[in-house]
Image (cartoon, grey):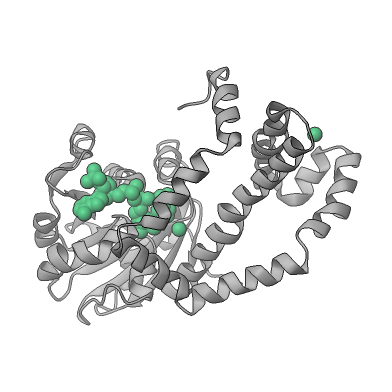
Protein backbone atom coordinates (compact mmCIF):
# COMPACT_ATOMS: atom_id res chain seq x y z
CA UNK A 1 0.00 0.00 0.00
CA UNK A 2 1.03 3.59 -0.60
CA UNK A 3 2.82 5.64 2.04
CA UNK A 4 0.59 8.64 2.88
CA UNK A 5 1.69 11.65 4.93
CA UNK A 6 -0.58 13.99 6.89
CA UNK A 7 -0.19 17.22 8.89
CA UNK A 8 1.46 15.52 11.87
CA UNK A 9 4.20 14.14 9.59
CA UNK A 10 5.33 17.59 8.38
CA UNK A 11 7.00 20.51 10.15
CA UNK A 12 6.66 24.03 8.72
CA UNK A 13 9.66 25.16 10.81
CA UNK A 14 11.91 23.38 8.29
CA UNK A 15 11.10 26.27 5.91
CA UNK A 16 11.33 29.12 8.43
CA UNK A 17 14.08 31.57 7.48
CA UNK A 18 14.16 30.19 3.92
CA UNK A 19 13.08 32.19 0.89
CA UNK A 20 10.77 30.38 -1.53
CA UNK A 21 10.59 31.58 -5.14
CA UNK A 22 7.43 30.54 -6.97
CA UNK A 23 8.09 30.92 -10.69
CA UNK A 24 4.85 31.66 -12.54
CA UNK A 25 1.50 32.88 -11.28
CA UNK A 26 -0.93 30.78 -13.31
CA UNK A 27 -3.22 28.02 -12.13
CA UNK A 28 -0.75 26.45 -9.70
CA UNK A 29 1.51 29.47 -9.14
CA UNK A 30 -1.17 31.79 -7.78
CA UNK A 31 -2.56 29.16 -5.43
CA UNK A 32 0.71 27.76 -4.13
CA UNK A 33 2.26 31.22 -3.63
CA UNK A 34 -0.75 32.53 -1.70
CA UNK A 35 -1.11 29.38 0.41
CA UNK A 36 2.59 29.40 1.35
CA UNK A 37 2.37 33.07 2.30
CA UNK A 38 -0.75 32.48 4.40
CA UNK A 39 1.12 29.61 6.10
CA UNK A 40 3.62 32.24 7.33
CA UNK A 41 6.40 31.49 4.85
CA UNK A 42 8.64 33.93 2.97
CA UNK A 43 7.56 33.92 -0.69
CA UNK A 44 8.71 35.82 -3.77
CA UNK A 45 7.01 35.37 -7.15
CA UNK A 46 9.18 35.22 -10.29
CA UNK A 47 7.56 36.54 -13.48
CA UNK A 48 8.69 37.81 -16.87
CA UNK A 49 8.74 41.62 -17.09
CA UNK A 50 5.75 41.78 -19.46
CA UNK A 51 3.66 39.33 -17.40
CA UNK A 52 -0.09 39.85 -17.28
CA UNK A 53 -0.13 38.24 -13.83
CA UNK A 54 2.04 40.85 -12.09
CA UNK A 55 -0.84 43.05 -10.90
CA UNK A 56 -2.77 40.10 -9.49
CA UNK A 57 0.25 38.82 -7.56
CA UNK A 58 0.96 42.26 -6.13
CA UNK A 59 -2.71 42.75 -5.24
CA UNK A 60 -2.47 39.52 -3.21
CA UNK A 61 0.34 41.12 -1.21
CA UNK A 62 3.11 39.11 -2.85
CA UNK A 63 6.53 40.46 -3.76
CA UNK A 64 7.19 40.11 -7.51
CA UNK A 65 10.59 40.01 -9.20
CA UNK A 66 11.98 38.71 -12.48
CA UNK A 67 12.59 34.97 -12.66
CA UNK A 68 16.37 35.55 -12.54
CA UNK A 69 16.19 37.90 -9.52
CA UNK A 70 13.89 35.55 -7.64
CA UNK A 71 16.12 32.56 -8.47
CA UNK A 72 19.17 34.45 -7.25
CA UNK A 73 17.77 35.28 -3.83
CA UNK A 74 15.74 32.14 -3.14
CA UNK A 75 16.76 29.03 -1.19
CA UNK A 76 13.89 27.05 -2.69
CA UNK A 77 12.78 27.44 -6.30
CA UNK A 78 9.41 26.01 -7.34
CA UNK A 79 8.96 26.05 -11.15
CA UNK A 80 5.27 26.59 -11.99
CA UNK A 81 5.67 27.69 -15.60
CA UNK A 82 4.01 25.85 -18.50
CA UNK A 83 5.82 22.52 -18.90
CA UNK A 84 6.84 23.34 -22.47
CA UNK A 85 8.64 26.58 -21.49
CA UNK A 86 10.34 25.30 -18.32
CA UNK A 87 13.51 23.99 -19.98
CA UNK A 88 14.33 27.26 -21.76
CA UNK A 89 13.55 29.48 -18.75
CA UNK A 90 15.51 27.12 -16.51
CA UNK A 91 18.55 27.27 -18.80
CA UNK A 92 18.52 31.03 -19.26
CA UNK A 93 17.22 32.42 -15.97
CA UNK A 94 17.40 29.81 -13.22
CA UNK A 95 20.44 27.56 -13.77
CA UNK A 96 22.97 30.44 -13.44
CA UNK A 97 21.71 31.05 -9.88
CA UNK A 98 21.13 27.43 -8.84
CA UNK A 99 24.10 27.20 -6.50
CA UNK A 100 24.95 24.23 -4.29
CA UNK A 101 22.60 23.65 -1.36
CA UNK A 102 19.55 25.17 -3.03
CA UNK A 103 16.34 23.25 -3.61
CA UNK A 104 14.69 22.89 -7.02
CA UNK A 105 11.02 21.98 -7.03
CA UNK A 106 8.34 21.00 -9.54
CA UNK A 107 4.65 20.14 -9.53
CA UNK A 108 4.96 17.76 -12.49
CA UNK A 109 7.87 15.50 -13.43
CA UNK A 110 7.89 15.91 -17.24
CA UNK A 111 11.05 17.98 -17.66
CA UNK A 112 13.14 16.04 -15.16
CA UNK A 113 11.92 12.60 -16.19
CA UNK A 114 12.44 13.26 -19.91
CA UNK A 115 15.82 14.96 -19.31
CA UNK A 116 14.81 18.40 -20.57
CA UNK A 117 16.16 19.85 -17.32
CA UNK A 118 19.33 18.32 -15.87
CA UNK A 119 20.07 19.95 -12.50
CA UNK A 120 23.51 19.99 -10.89
CA UNK A 121 24.20 17.18 -8.41
CA UNK A 122 24.58 19.45 -5.37
CA UNK A 123 20.94 20.63 -5.20
CA UNK A 124 17.87 18.83 -3.88
CA UNK A 125 15.26 18.08 -6.54
CA UNK A 126 11.77 17.55 -5.17
CA UNK A 127 8.27 17.31 -6.56
CA UNK A 128 5.11 18.29 -4.73
CA UNK A 129 2.29 17.78 -7.21
CA UNK A 130 -1.24 18.73 -6.16
CA UNK A 131 -3.77 16.29 -7.61
CA UNK A 132 -6.26 18.98 -8.52
CA UNK A 133 -6.54 22.22 -10.47
CA UNK A 134 -4.97 25.36 -9.01
CA UNK A 135 -8.19 27.18 -8.18
CA UNK A 136 -9.16 24.24 -5.94
CA UNK A 137 -5.73 24.28 -4.27
CA UNK A 138 -6.47 27.85 -3.22
CA UNK A 139 -10.19 27.53 -2.45
CA UNK A 140 -9.85 24.40 -0.31
CA UNK A 141 -6.92 25.94 1.60
CA UNK A 142 -8.97 29.04 2.46
CA UNK A 143 -11.82 26.78 3.61
CA UNK A 144 -9.47 24.91 5.94
CA UNK A 145 -9.26 21.84 3.71
CA UNK A 146 -6.72 20.80 1.11
CA UNK A 147 -6.15 19.09 -2.22
CA UNK A 148 -4.20 15.81 -1.96
CA UNK A 149 -0.73 15.77 -3.49
CA UNK A 150 2.14 13.53 -4.51
CA UNK A 151 5.68 13.91 -3.20
CA UNK A 152 8.80 12.59 -4.92
CA UNK A 153 12.50 13.02 -4.34
CA UNK A 154 14.76 12.93 -7.41
CA UNK A 155 17.95 14.16 -5.73
CA UNK A 156 18.63 14.39 -2.00
CA UNK A 157 21.88 16.35 -1.82
CA UNK A 158 21.12 17.80 1.62
CA UNK A 159 19.83 14.59 3.17
CA UNK A 160 16.74 16.64 4.15
CA UNK A 161 14.81 16.59 0.88
CA UNK A 162 11.89 14.59 2.30
CA UNK A 163 11.42 16.95 5.27
CA UNK A 164 11.63 19.98 2.99
CA UNK A 165 9.14 18.53 0.54
CA UNK A 166 6.69 17.58 3.29
CA UNK A 167 6.97 21.04 4.86
CA UNK A 168 6.23 22.58 1.46
CA UNK A 169 3.24 20.25 1.03
CA UNK A 170 2.00 21.38 4.45
CA UNK A 171 2.49 25.01 3.44
CA UNK A 172 0.12 24.62 0.51
CA UNK A 173 -2.42 22.68 2.60
CA UNK A 174 -1.88 19.30 0.94
CA UNK A 175 -1.01 17.35 4.10
CA UNK A 176 -4.54 18.12 5.38
CA UNK A 177 -5.85 15.82 2.63
CA UNK A 178 -2.95 13.37 2.31
CA UNK A 179 0.37 13.32 0.46
CA UNK A 180 1.35 10.09 -1.28
CA UNK A 181 4.96 9.13 -1.86
CA UNK A 182 5.91 8.44 -5.47
CA UNK A 183 8.76 8.86 -7.97
CA UNK A 184 9.19 11.38 -10.81
CA UNK A 185 8.78 8.45 -13.24
CA UNK A 186 5.54 7.19 -11.71
CA UNK A 187 4.02 10.67 -11.39
CA UNK A 188 4.95 11.71 -14.94
CA UNK A 189 3.74 8.52 -16.59
CA UNK A 190 0.50 8.17 -14.61
CA UNK A 191 -0.33 11.88 -14.96
CA UNK A 192 0.10 11.78 -18.74
CA UNK A 193 -1.82 8.51 -19.00
CA UNK A 194 -4.66 9.75 -16.81
CA UNK A 195 -5.18 12.95 -18.78
CA UNK A 196 -4.88 11.21 -22.16
CA UNK A 197 -6.85 8.01 -21.61
CA UNK A 198 -9.46 8.90 -19.00
CA UNK A 199 -9.78 12.42 -17.61
CA UNK A 200 -9.45 14.56 -20.71
CA UNK A 201 -8.95 12.52 -23.88
CA UNK A 202 -11.12 9.54 -22.99
CA UNK A 203 -13.91 11.64 -21.50
CA UNK A 204 -14.19 14.26 -24.24
CA UNK A 205 -14.10 11.58 -26.94
CA UNK A 206 -16.80 9.58 -25.13
CA UNK A 207 -19.01 12.66 -24.65
CA UNK A 208 -18.66 13.72 -28.29
CA UNK A 209 -19.28 10.20 -29.64
CA UNK A 210 -22.45 9.91 -27.56
CA UNK A 211 -23.63 13.38 -28.61
CA UNK A 212 -22.94 12.68 -32.29
CA UNK A 213 -24.70 9.31 -32.15
CA UNK A 214 -27.90 10.90 -30.83
CA UNK A 215 -27.79 13.90 -33.20
CA UNK A 216 -27.05 11.72 -36.24
CA UNK A 217 -30.06 9.57 -35.27
CA UNK A 218 -32.26 12.68 -35.50
CA UNK A 219 -32.61 13.64 -31.83
CA UNK A 220 -32.46 17.32 -30.80
CA UNK A 221 -28.89 18.52 -30.14
CA UNK A 222 -30.05 20.30 -26.96
CA UNK A 223 -31.32 17.02 -25.50
CA UNK A 224 -28.15 15.23 -26.60
CA UNK A 225 -26.09 17.93 -24.86
CA UNK A 226 -27.91 17.54 -21.54
CA UNK A 227 -27.82 13.74 -21.73
CA UNK A 228 -24.17 13.32 -22.73
CA UNK A 229 -22.36 16.33 -21.26
CA UNK A 230 -24.32 18.27 -18.65
CA UNK A 231 -25.42 15.25 -16.61
CA UNK A 232 -21.91 13.83 -16.55
CA UNK A 233 -20.96 16.20 -13.74
CA UNK A 234 -23.77 14.96 -11.53
CA UNK A 235 -22.70 11.36 -12.08
CA UNK A 236 -19.01 12.09 -11.50
CA UNK A 237 -19.81 14.07 -8.33
CA UNK A 238 -21.49 10.96 -6.91
CA UNK A 239 -18.49 8.77 -7.79
CA UNK A 240 -16.19 11.38 -6.22
CA UNK A 241 -18.22 11.33 -2.99
CA UNK A 242 -18.67 7.61 -2.53
CA UNK A 243 -17.14 5.61 -5.34
CA UNK A 244 -18.86 3.87 -8.23
CA UNK A 245 -21.06 1.95 -5.77
CA UNK A 246 -22.55 5.18 -4.36
CA UNK A 247 -23.30 6.51 -7.85
CA UNK A 248 -25.02 3.19 -8.65
CA UNK A 249 -26.99 3.37 -5.41
CA UNK A 250 -28.30 6.79 -6.44
CA UNK A 251 -29.31 6.02 -10.04
CA UNK A 252 -32.37 3.95 -10.99
CA UNK A 253 -32.11 0.15 -11.25
CA UNK A 254 -32.82 0.53 -14.97
CA UNK A 255 -29.80 2.82 -15.30
CA UNK A 256 -27.66 0.50 -13.20
CA UNK A 257 -28.61 -2.55 -15.30
CA UNK A 258 -27.78 -0.62 -18.49
CA UNK A 259 -24.51 0.49 -16.90
CA UNK A 260 -23.20 -2.97 -16.01
CA UNK A 261 -24.39 -4.71 -19.19
CA UNK A 262 -23.63 -2.02 -21.82
CA UNK A 263 -20.58 -0.24 -20.35
CA UNK A 264 -18.18 -3.16 -20.86
CA UNK A 265 -19.44 -3.61 -24.45
CA UNK A 266 -18.32 -0.03 -25.18
CA UNK A 267 -15.06 0.02 -23.25
CA UNK A 268 -14.02 -3.45 -24.37
CA UNK A 269 -10.71 -5.27 -24.83
CA UNK A 270 -10.11 -3.27 -27.98
CA UNK A 271 -10.22 0.01 -26.01
CA UNK A 272 -8.04 -1.45 -23.30
CA UNK A 273 -5.47 -2.58 -25.82
CA UNK A 274 -5.41 0.96 -27.28
CA UNK A 275 -4.91 2.27 -23.74
CA UNK A 276 -1.92 -0.03 -23.42
CA UNK A 277 -0.32 1.35 -26.58
CA UNK A 278 -0.97 4.91 -25.40
CA UNK A 279 0.73 4.03 -22.11
CA UNK A 280 3.67 2.54 -23.99
CA UNK A 281 4.11 5.73 -26.05
CA UNK A 282 4.33 7.61 -22.76
CA UNK A 283 6.78 5.15 -21.19
CA UNK A 284 9.16 4.99 -24.14
CA UNK A 285 9.22 8.77 -24.68
CA UNK A 286 7.37 8.81 -28.03
CA UNK A 287 4.69 11.15 -26.70
CA UNK A 288 7.25 13.42 -24.99
CA UNK A 289 9.30 13.66 -28.18
CA UNK A 290 6.20 14.47 -30.26
CA UNK A 291 5.07 17.21 -27.83
CA UNK A 292 8.54 18.75 -27.51
CA UNK A 293 8.97 18.87 -31.32
CA UNK A 294 5.43 20.22 -31.78
CA UNK A 295 6.32 23.13 -29.49
CA UNK A 296 9.64 23.73 -31.23
CA UNK A 297 7.77 23.94 -34.54
CA UNK A 298 5.37 26.59 -33.16
CA UNK A 299 2.47 24.19 -32.51
CA UNK A 300 1.08 23.82 -36.07
CA UNK A 301 -0.93 20.63 -35.41
CA UNK A 302 -2.02 21.65 -31.93
CA UNK A 303 -3.42 24.96 -33.21
CA UNK A 304 -5.30 23.19 -36.01
CA UNK A 305 -6.80 20.64 -33.59
CA UNK A 306 -7.81 23.43 -31.21
CA UNK A 307 -9.62 25.36 -33.93
CA UNK A 308 -11.45 22.29 -35.21
CA UNK A 309 -12.51 21.17 -31.72
CA UNK A 310 -13.90 24.61 -30.88
CA UNK A 311 -16.13 24.52 -33.95
CA UNK A 312 -17.87 21.27 -32.89
CA UNK A 313 -21.68 21.48 -32.66
CA UNK A 314 -21.60 20.41 -29.01
CA UNK A 315 -19.75 23.65 -28.14
CA UNK A 316 -22.26 25.85 -29.97
CA UNK A 317 -25.26 24.12 -28.41
CA UNK A 318 -23.57 24.21 -25.01
CA UNK A 319 -22.82 27.94 -25.27
CA UNK A 320 -26.51 28.65 -25.94
CA UNK A 321 -27.85 26.43 -23.16
CA UNK A 322 -25.42 27.70 -20.56
CA UNK A 323 -26.45 31.31 -21.35
CA UNK A 324 -29.61 30.58 -19.34
CA UNK A 325 -27.69 29.12 -16.39
CA UNK A 326 -26.61 32.36 -14.80
CA UNK A 327 -24.94 30.49 -11.92
CA UNK A 328 -22.30 29.05 -14.21
CA UNK A 329 -19.18 31.21 -14.34
CA UNK A 330 -17.84 32.08 -17.80
P1 LIG B 1 -0.23 28.11 -16.24
O1 LIG B 1 -0.17 28.04 -17.72
O2 LIG B 1 -1.56 28.25 -15.59
O3 LIG B 1 0.67 29.30 -15.71
C1 LIG B 1 1.94 29.54 -16.19
C2 LIG B 1 2.54 30.78 -15.57
O4 LIG B 1 3.83 30.93 -16.11
C3 LIG B 1 1.78 32.05 -15.84
O5 LIG B 1 1.81 32.82 -14.67
C4 LIG B 1 2.58 32.73 -16.94
O6 LIG B 1 2.47 34.12 -16.71
C5 LIG B 1 3.97 32.25 -16.63
N1 LIG B 1 4.86 32.17 -17.78
C6 LIG B 1 4.59 31.62 -18.99
N2 LIG B 1 5.66 31.67 -19.78
C7 LIG B 1 6.64 32.27 -19.06
C8 LIG B 1 7.99 32.63 -19.32
N3 LIG B 1 8.56 32.37 -20.50
N4 LIG B 1 8.70 33.23 -18.33
C9 LIG B 1 8.15 33.49 -17.15
N5 LIG B 1 6.86 33.19 -16.83
C10 LIG B 1 6.13 32.58 -17.79
O7 LIG B 1 0.53 26.80 -15.69
P2 LIG B 1 -0.02 25.72 -14.66
O8 LIG B 1 -0.17 26.34 -13.32
O9 LIG B 1 -1.16 24.98 -15.27
O10 LIG B 1 1.20 24.68 -14.65
C11 LIG B 1 2.37 24.92 -13.89
C12 LIG B 1 2.96 23.57 -13.50
O11 LIG B 1 2.07 22.91 -12.62
C13 LIG B 1 3.19 22.62 -14.67
O12 LIG B 1 4.34 21.88 -14.40
C14 LIG B 1 1.96 21.72 -14.62
O13 LIG B 1 2.15 20.44 -15.18
C15 LIG B 1 1.78 21.61 -13.12
N6 LIG B 1 0.44 21.23 -12.68
C16 LIG B 1 -0.65 21.95 -13.11
C17 LIG B 1 -1.90 21.66 -12.64
C18 LIG B 1 -3.05 22.55 -12.95
O14 LIG B 1 -4.01 22.53 -12.20
N7 LIG B 1 -3.06 23.36 -14.00
C19 LIG B 1 -2.14 20.50 -11.74
C20 LIG B 1 -0.93 19.89 -11.26
C21 LIG B 1 0.31 20.23 -11.76
P3 LIG B 1 2.36 35.25 -17.85
O15 LIG B 1 1.87 34.56 -19.11
O16 LIG B 1 1.40 36.23 -17.28
O17 LIG B 1 3.73 35.77 -17.93
MG1 LIG C 1 -0.85 16.88 -16.35
MG1 LIG D 1 -31.21 9.78 -17.91
Q: Position of residue 188 (x, y in %)?
A: 45, 68
Q: Position of residue 296 (x, y in %)?
A: 29, 64
* Residue 84 visible in the snapshot: yes
Quadrant location, the C terminus: top left
Is 68 left, or right, of 289 in this rendering? left
Q: Nearer the viewer, residue 65 or 38?
A: 65
Relative height, residue 1 to residue 170 (above, below): below
What's the residue at 23%, 68% (across, down)?
A: 103
Q: Position of residue 225 (x, y in %)?
A: 67, 32
Is 120 left, or right, of 168 in this rendering? left
What's the residue at 17%, 69% (across, down)?
A: 91
In the displayed orientation, state which residue is furthest to the bottom.
121
Relative height, residue 149 to residue 135 (above, below): below
What's the residue at 68%, 36% (across, down)?
A: 234
Is 303 left, or right, of 228 in this rendering? left
The part of the image, by quadrant, that contains residue 291 is bottom left
Q: Position of residue 274 (x, y in %)?
A: 66, 69
Q: Nearer the viewer, residue 153 or 309?
A: 309
Q: Nearer the viewer, residue 263 or 64?
A: 263
Relative height, residue 294 to residue 161 (above, below): above
Is 238 left, or right, of 309 in this rendering? right
Number of marks present in the image shown: 0
What's the residue at 80%, 38% (across, down)?
A: 250
Quadrant location, the N terminus: bottom right
Amino acid sequence: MAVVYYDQDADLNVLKGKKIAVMGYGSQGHSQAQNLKDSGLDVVVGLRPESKSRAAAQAAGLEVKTVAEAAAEADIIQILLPDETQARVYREEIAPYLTGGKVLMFSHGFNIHFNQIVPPADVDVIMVAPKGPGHLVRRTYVEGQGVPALIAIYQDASGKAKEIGLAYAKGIGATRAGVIETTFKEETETDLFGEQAVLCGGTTALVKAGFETLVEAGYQPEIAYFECLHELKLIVDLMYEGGIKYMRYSISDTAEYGDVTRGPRLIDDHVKSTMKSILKEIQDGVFAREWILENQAGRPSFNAFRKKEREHLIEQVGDQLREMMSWLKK
